[in-house]
Structures are given as C-alpha cells and as structure tokens.
Image (cartoon, grey):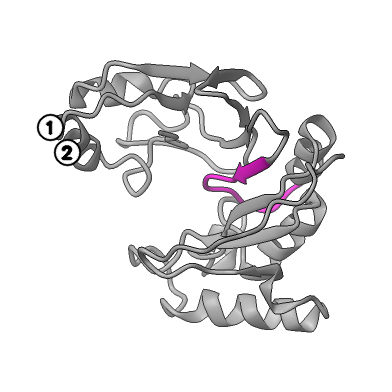
Amino acid sequence: MLVSHAHYDHMDLPSLRALVRRGDNPLVVTPLANAHFMYKTRLKRIMELDWWQAVTTGGIHITCTPARHGAARTPFDRNTSLWGGFMLRDEAGHQLFFAGDTADGRHWRLIRQRLGAPDIALLPIGAYEPRALMERVHTTPEEALSGLRQLGARHGIGMHFGTFRLTDEPMDEPVTRLAKAVQDAGLPPDTMGIMAHGACRGIAWDQPNDA
C-alpha cells in the first residue's frame, strides 16, 4: 500500500484502520516521517523512504520520487513530514508511475532521466483553482498531460478529482479539460483519460519502456 503524504484527503486514518480490523497486514510504503501518524491505526509494517530511495517487495521494486507539494495534519507541523510519488517496476521491466499530489515542474524530466519512462502514469488533474494559490501544489489537466509527455509514458490515467470538494473549479471540469487538452494536442483519445469509480480496464503491456 502506497501513502503519498500526510494530508487528510490522502492519509485517511479511518480507512487505514478499517484494513486492520479486516485482518489485513499490508506493507505500507510512504515518504519520511509519516509512519508515526499511521501507527495509530495499528498498522505494523511501515517502510519510510526518502526521495530516490527504494524497496523491493513481492517482486515489485518501489522507488519514492520527488513532487512539488507540501504536507501537514495540524497548524503546527507544516512540512515536517515528506511527500512524494512512487515508481513501481516489476521483474519484467514494466513500470507504473503514481505521481501522488504534485504541481507541475522539472521533476517529471528528472524522474524519467533517473528511472526511465513509465508504461502507465497516474497523474493528478484536479484541485487547481484559484491558480494564484494552487499553482505551487496542484497541476491543471493541461499540465498533467504535459507531465505525461515529459515522463515519456505510453498511457496516462487522470486522478485526484471528483472525490472531495477542495477548490473552486466545478467538480466535473477536470475531465472535460483533460479530454480537450488531448484533442488539442492531436493525440489519440486513449493517450490519457480517467477511470470511473470501481472500473477496470485492460491495457496491453508492450516491450519494457526505456529512458
């Protein structure tokens, strides 16, 4: 289980506690200084990573990656815990990138340079208005598509929208803006889209991607 940072909409302790009650004991991988929040849920197997550190479990190599964001759970612990994303690589060399919560930035290219291009990238597309406040912490749909191309990913899936009302844009706007951005860029419609709640989709793996 991957936990990107300590914000309440990403580290929901009641949800984590429910996993413990169900009898699960997953390995939780999270950036530095986040474990102490989750020990309250009785999760026992928690691995903290700094940016670019990695752990291998169950044949999956997981690297913590940088992001432009921040973290806090109270007014008094701003940025005392780390935030980030994760690159997952299987034994065949296929890669899936989960960006976590992030703004646009040069970290896209750094991730590709150090870890190679992912086959699939999960990128945030919501919570971006007003831009004067949000541009340092959240991407627009257009910036997410740009990030996909800088990463060199074959497929993108938009996330971080439509669950909590966090910012000023209409709840359904990120989806329509993403579709328009893909069209305006002259890319195939399936280059990057979204998945409905509970949806499944088959995506064929090609040969492992490279840098």
Of residue 104 and residue 2, the one placed in the foreground of this image is 2
Tell me where residue 204 appears, x and y as whole percent. 66, 57
Of residue 76 and residue 88, the one placed in the foreground of this image is 88
Tell me where residue 142 appears, x and y as whole percent. 69, 70
Q: Main secondary structure of the magenta part?
A: loop
For numbered disc 1, what is the local secondary structure?
helix
Q: Is residue 205 left or right of residue 170?
A: right
Of residue 8 and residue 208, the one placed in the foreground of this image is 208
> Magenta region: which residues?
95-105
Tell me where residue 4 appears, x and y as whole percent. 47, 37
For numbered disc 2, what is the local secondary structure?
helix
Residue behind mark 1: 21
Of residue 67 and residue 75, the one placed in the foreground of this image is 67
In the displayed structure, 12 sits above or below 91; it is: below
Q: Is residue 24 left or right of residue 211?
A: left
Q: Is residue 201 left or right of residue 109?
A: left
Q: Indicate the amino acid at tag 2.
A: Ala
Q: Are marks 1 and 2 in contact (CB under 8 Å)?
A: yes
**Magenta highlight on residue 162:** no
Q: Indicate the amino acid at tag 1.
A: Arg
| Residue drawn at (18%, 34%) of the image | 17
Residue behind mark 2: 18
Q: Quadrant of residue 92?
A: top right
Q: Quadrant of the C terminus?
A: top right
| Residue drawn at (73%, 34%) of the image | 93
Report how far apart the C-alphas of labels 1 and 2 lie in the structure. Answer: 5 Å
| Residue drawn at (51%, 39%) of the image | 70
In the displayed structure, 19 sits above or below 122; it is: above
In the displayed structure, 121 sits above or below 83; it is: below
Tell me where residue 90 appears, x and y as whole percent. 63, 32
Q: Quadrant of the N terminus?
A: top left
